[in-house]
Image: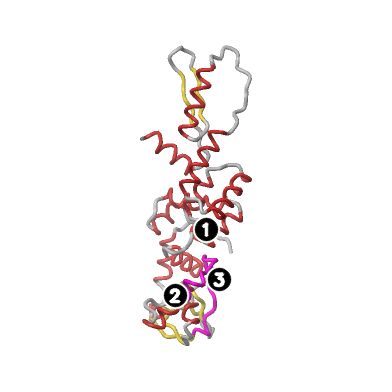
Amino acid sequence: MRKALGRGIDSLITKVQNNDISGDMVQKIPVSKIRPNRYQPRRNFDEASLEELSRSIKERGLLQPISVWKDQGDDHFELIAGERRLRASKLAGIAEIDAIVKKDLDDEQKLGLSLIENIQREDLNAIDTALAYRQLMDNFGVSQTDIAERVHKSRVAVSNTLRLLELDEDIRQGIQAGAIKEGHARALLSIPDSARRREFYQRIVAEGLSVRDVEAFAQGFHAQKPRAHKAPRAGSRRTPEVAELESSLEKTLGTKVEVCPGPGPQNGKIIVHYFSLDDLDRVTQIIRK
């Protein structure tokens, strides 16, 4: 199902909210009649965390109902949000669970509502969140700005989260499994060389390196990267002093820098390169200090 609707998230929510209000009542339903969510953005569930939640449900009960939908004529329910609570309830041996039941939603409403409810949860990892953002964009033509407004984040934050999908598959899996933090991943993104990026990812996992360690390596990678030796253009005033200044600036900024003398003896320009949005933010912060 791929639809470039471009109507925005709010229109999807409105369409659901305008549905039969009687379907929004909290009901007790058998856990055995609940099917998994086809659009669940979460890919990994920590077993220890589920056990802890299961014990809490046994002691205190379910504090927040799950959300499900039910199509007319179907005696089963499909989960919208609350899979951790459902799994933990099953572990606790609970036969029935409190649920907000929505009725007769079409596939568009189901996907939109499911993704929105799940990405607003703070415990969703960055890759699963990015995949949910991507589904909203691909299936509904929703813009990054619209997503940002709905989840109360900046557009840059949404864009940076989406960029994590550019990482190698093993690194993405590491984020989903909790082997590395989102900060590690953002720092790894600034290393353009895939082999070195994956090599350093393995070091993070094996040695427990901090986010600052990765950022320092990324800066050093750009500073130590061999410069291509170009034959000087006719009339160029590139001198050993200019080359030394470039080298010094590169070490300070952790990225490629070009000092380009102008036509006059007292003018020119400095070109500072960046290789990702996170890299741009990092360089900008250094310059502003």
Query: Which label lies toward us, 3 or 1?
Result: 1
Query: Which label lies toward us, 3 or 2?
Result: 2
Q: Position of residue 62 (x, y in %)?
A: 39, 80
Q: Residue shown at 44%/40% (left/top)?
A: 282
- Element type where label 2 sits in the image: helix
Mark 2, residue position: 52
Q: Earlier in the sequence, mark 3 or mark 1?
A: 3
Instruction: Tell me how far mark 2 sits from mark 1, CA to CA.
Output: 24 Å
Q: Position of residue 115 (x, y in %)?
A: 48, 65
Q: Which amino acid, mark 1? A: Ile
Q: Residues within 10 Å of mark 3 (few under 14, many from 20)?
A: few
Mark 3, residue position: 38
Please state the extent of the stretch shown in magenta in the rendering: 31-53
Q: Residue shown at 53%/73% (left/top)?
A: 37
Q: Earlier in the sequence, mark 2 or mark 1?
A: 2
Task: Check whether the beta carbons of the residues at disc 3 and disc 2 lie within 8 A of each other.
Answer: no
User: What is the number of the mark on residue 127?
Assistant: 1
Q: Position of residue 269 (x, y in %)?
A: 46, 23
Picture layout, residue 199 above or below residue 150: above
Instruction: Tell me how far mark 3 sits from mark 2, CA to CA.
Output: 25 Å
